[in-house]
Image: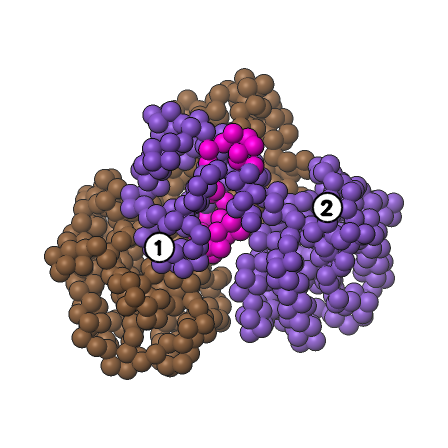
Chain colours: A brown, B purple
Amino acid sequence: MSLDRIRRRLQRRNLDALLVTQPENRHYLSGYTASDHGIAGSAGVLLIPATSQPYLLTDGRYRLQAEEQAPEFQVRVYHRGLLPLLRRLFTSLRLQRLAFESHYLLHSVYCDLTKLAERKKVELVPLVGLVEDLRQIKNEAELALIVAAVRINEEVFATVYPQLRPGMSEREVARLIEETMHQRGAQGPSFPTIVAAGANAAKPHAVPTARLIAQGEPIIIDMGLKIDGYCSDMTRTVVLGRPDGRILELIRLVRRAQLAGQQALRAGVSGSFVDQVARQVITEAGYGDYFAHGLGHGVGLNVHEGPYLSYRNRQQLRPGMVLTVEPGIYLPGWGGVRLENMAVITANGCRILNQDTTFLDV
Amino acid sequence: MSLDRIRRRLQRRNLDALLVTQPENRHYLSGYTASDHGIAGSAGVLLIPATSQPYLLTDGRYRLQAEEQAPEFQVRVYHRGLLPLLRRLFTSLRLQRLAFESHYLLHSVYCDLTKLAERKKVELVPLVGLVEDLRQIKNEAELALIVAAVRINEEVFATVYPQLRPGMSEREVARLIEETMHQRGAQGPSFPTIVAAGANAAKPHAVPTARLIAQGEPIIIDMGLKIDGYCSDMTRTVVLGRPDGRILELIRLVRRAQLAGQQALRAGVSGSFVDQVARQVITEAGYGDYFAHGLGHGVGLNVHEGPYLSYRNRQQLRPGMVLTVEPGIYLPGWGGVRLENMAVITANGCRILNQDTTFLDV
């Protein structure tokens, strides 16, 4: 069905085919789940003609997996790189206008592709986000996987939280979380788990260190996992023992900003509007300079994908979009507070996917 | 010192600066170790003028980490994306010719950068592999980390191998391996651990499944870990219980090919020569069609990096290069065998970094 929608869009734009290089788009359209080793170590690409059967092009190492997982696709194996195989397909499919994913093709590969296209008189048309646009709206099956990923993530948190003790290292806690994810059947974390205590919590993207967690300091735990490729993402800020007045103040402030954002999140408004509503709560309290990232992002096959809740996103939100709402305040040298839930936009507002209310403990 | 070499190379080519977007190059030159969320989720870039102090450009989330880890660099934070900050630096540094990493810049970013460069009358010069070329030759400190990564990887294997039992799933074994890596102090696996038993072992890049491992079948275990960013990579093929004649034949054949490759590996020969020497052993035994990948690859900050032992690499190997030697034979429907060691090229031959000889058990 997604394939049909892509084909119709190609036809409308008078494009003969689309070359899909972005790995989550490849998974989304074909069902083929192999992992790339970074952008330079691709496990294959899709070539989707506007009016005929699609191809999955990969190398010999992935042939069996591709054939098993992508039965709608003709699997073609390249032995000496992708370009010689593409050259043959340019001819056999009589391509004249080929779209490619400008946002997931390296400049160097583009240069090689250009030379080939010139020889074959194929016009290359850069596209950004054609498949990603489809992916923003989740269908029921996708939503079920995301809901499962959120639920299991919360179970993991609920298992680990009571085990936290002063003297455990950030890294030890992160390992315990990821180990528990695997025990609960997750495919793996959707990003490297963040456990950041005390001053480390002032880094929104902290990497867990050997630092030991202590009583009374803010501990940011940002964690997510994957179920059949679909991601969850949740942040909690916890304190062992009695929190001091500043932590209490900041957690309550961030929670107020989150609630304001969640209440503003609905179809028809823009991502920048929702960001602005939550940000204003923090700005009015005098901490605006310390909330140095966007309010949220889409979640699906990528843990970070569109749409974004950011000053940059003027597009209207639509039902079926799944987003995080994650305001934070980071004070260099002291620490930070972030709270993150996931929500799906519905016909009349949004539904919060998280049920954990640990922040009420603090 | 690496920075000085880069600056000299820029001066020789009459380039005013290099924009470093490749994350391992960034780590190599600056010491800054933040992880990107894929190519579209960069944790920062370097701008290295040919004759003045270098810059690390990142967003607010990474400021503290960047300042801590890269004291030689001026850290500049962008609030509204990289390009507006670059525009200001183009002016203040009076850039005229800016080199960029063509092999690690997305086409879409290149298009935006081109517009900016045209307005500022800056010439963009695509480069491929300038920093990677330096990285191919490891210094003593790097080699020490790689040797540690290999040694700990072997300790992990030696811990897990005696625990293997029929009825464990591939995934369970992979988890046990990665768990043991963390217990031994590794930063993490250098790639998702492969455990592929029976027919799954016919996929060189198999993902561990729920399939239970059984007596008598070939089990490919391909594993590696990171120590301070530097990687190891090792493959063993093991059998629980008594191997049949075919497995014995193939393991011995693959081992002979590996020994031939290891003996051919030395300074002055090309990567394609070493590949050819090992491949010939397998081809002469009639299995040439079933060895569908290159013989090996460089290992360093990337688990797959240059130089490659492949028909494509005509460049001479040099002392200080670290490579894998990993012939394999994959029979669809039956399974496969692969053996992989790492070696460093020395003044007179190479030194094999692995000491594990589990293949002698089979």
Chain of the residue where label 2 is placed in the rendered structure: B
Q: Is residue A131 visible?
A: yes
Answer above or below: position of B35 versus A254: above
Q: Is residue A191 left or right of residue B173?
A: left
Question: How far across and down, in percent of the image, does residue A293 sit?
Answer: 28, 52
Q: Is residue A339 visible?
A: no
Q: Is residue B183 left or right of residue B280?
A: left
Q: Which image quadrant for residue B338?
A: bottom right
Tell me which numbered mark, 1 or 2, is placed earlier along the sequence. 1
Question: How far across and down, in percent of the image, does residue B131 sit?
Answer: 56, 43
Residue in the foreground of this view, choosing between A42 and B28:
B28
Q: Are marks 1 and 2 in contact (CB under 8 Å)?
A: no
The question of residue B17 being in magenta is answered with yes
Residue sitting at x 30%, y 66%: A333
Q: Which residues are magenta?
A: B9-38
Q: How many marks?
A: 2
Residue sitting at x 49%, y 21%: A123
Q: Is residue A234 left or right of residue A179?
A: left
Chain of the residue where label 1 is placed in the rendered structure: B
